[in-house]
Amino acid sequence: MAYSGMAGAPGLVGMSTPATSTTTRQVKLDKESELRIEVGMEIPLRLRLLTGTAEIFGTELPPEIWLSFPPRHKFAVFTWYGATIEMDGITETDYTADETPMVSYVNVHAVLEGRRNHAKASSSTDPDSSQGPRVIVVGPTDSGKSTLSKMLLSWAAKQGWKPTFVDLDIGQGSITIPGCIAATPIEMPIDPVEGIPLEMPLVYFFGHTTPSLNVDLYKVLVKELSQILERQFAGNAESRAAGMVINTMGWIEGVGYELLLHAIDTLNANVVLVLGQEKLCSMLKDVLKNKPNVDVVKLQKSGGVVSRNTKFRQKTRSYRIREYFYGLANDLSPHSNIANFSDLFVYKIGGGPQAPRSALPIGAEPAADPTRLVLVNINRDLLHLVLAVSFAKEPDQIISSNVAGFIYITDIDIQRKKITYLAPSAGELPSRFLIVGSLTWLET
Ligand SMILES: Nc1ncnc2c1ncn2[C@@H]1O[C@H](COP(=O)(O)OP(=O)(O)OP(=O)(O)O)[C@@H](O)[C@H]1O
């Protein structure tokens, strides 16, 4: 695992001292308690495990090694048997808590583990039982869904499984930039600083950060993703037995609820973990009662989960895009490239009328087709938008294709018909077909 090393940690000399500590200090944790930390807004926090054992969201801390957590990071160091932690730097808040839902979470992990073992043992004799658990984590915003997903994945990976992480959260997803749904196998416990490794995730670009802008397209993309995953599972008994953990959005009312049911159905989830909401749990139990193979389990929300307001969420999205191009520690060097208008084809999905008015019965209004491909005229409206580079070979494959990566439009020269864009690497783009939505970014 790529832990950030201790070298080059920020000096604290001459800094003002907020109410919380700025000096090196130790915290002793009793068994089954956790240290909850919100790193300050400007400067990273260094932290290391001095004695005992402890984990961050399911990933064990290496003894004695300093880890550097970026500004605004919110996390907890939990210990099952007791530990001493040393911190160096500024925190916005830090406190210890001995009431956590961790025992119930690890009990869920134990049940999933049993199902994985059963699936593995059945794979040669009974293909129908060879599917490991497909867990979907649902709940309102800020109920700890992403965190629980990470814990379940890291605990499974620690025991040698390679479960598939599916992130359907287009607002605050953890696999790639916002506006996408994605899946990736988790082969090692998730690095508490760097997050999910980005080796070849399967990514579909929705292009907006709320599904309400094109609900049908969102459903189509979830279906496309699920079909590819089914194909992968069919050819790989190991990942089939390890199963999936699916993270969802916090939108659980109305259309949001409908999308949850759609995801449960499309991805064939058989364990639904409901965090922090009785009403949602009872609605799901009721609607899924005819599916005896689907378990709906209510779990307590952790008191440590931090609520994030709209502004914070927008900022987080912007940092995620920045991280894509420049790396978490500014360790990547994106390239500024120039292309002719004629070199690239930019499509948006949805919007255009389905049929001309003349082709409709008298009085009928043309409805917008949510999955219609519309070729976009290149003009300055594209400035500061983030576009996806499709793997499609032909335009009609764009919706069903996953994406290779993203570019950011930094200039449009109408007179010379040139586009300047930032890309993760130099050289030609893997495809000339680009997808545009409403995902903007202001590079600062
Ligand atoms: N026990 C804890 N102690 C401290 N911070 C925590 C704890 N659990 C979760 N957090 C932090 O709280 C924030 C919200 O948690 P999380 O992202 O898991 O919620 P979510 O339900 O997935 O949110 P969303 O609805 O936006 O997707 C995150 O920054 C997470 O790191």
Image (cartoon, rainbow, N blue to C red):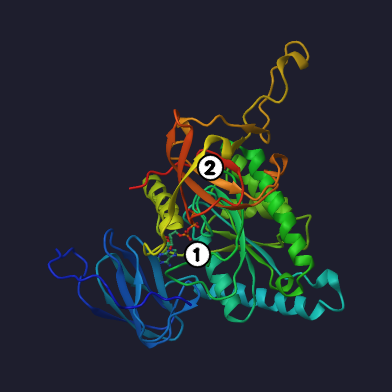
Question: Ligand 1 sits in which quadrant?
Answer: bottom left
x and y percentages locating residue 255 in the rendered image:
61, 40
Q: Is residue 137 above or below residue 133?
A: above
Residue at point 45%, 29% (across, down): 414
Q: Is residue 151 above or below residue 142?
A: below
Name the outermost residue toward the bottom. Answer: 51
Residue at point 30%, 70% (across, down): 45
Residue placed under numbered mark 1 in the picture = 147
- Amino acid under label 2? Thr
Q: Secondary structure at mark 2?
A: loop
Residue 7 badge: none
Label 2 or label 1, whichever comes before in sequence order:
1
Q: In screen coordinates, is 444 left or right of 372?
A: left
Residue placed under numbered mark 2 in the picture = 210
- Amino acid under label 1? Thr
Kindly tell me whether mark 1's CB lies below 8 Å from ligand 1: yes
- For the residues labelled 2 and 1, the Cα–Cα distance comes to 21 Å
Name the outermost residue toward the left. Answer: 14
x and y percentages locating residue 253 in the rendered image:
58, 43
x and y percentages locating residue 8 in the rendered image:
27, 74
Residue at point 61%, 81% (across, down): 159
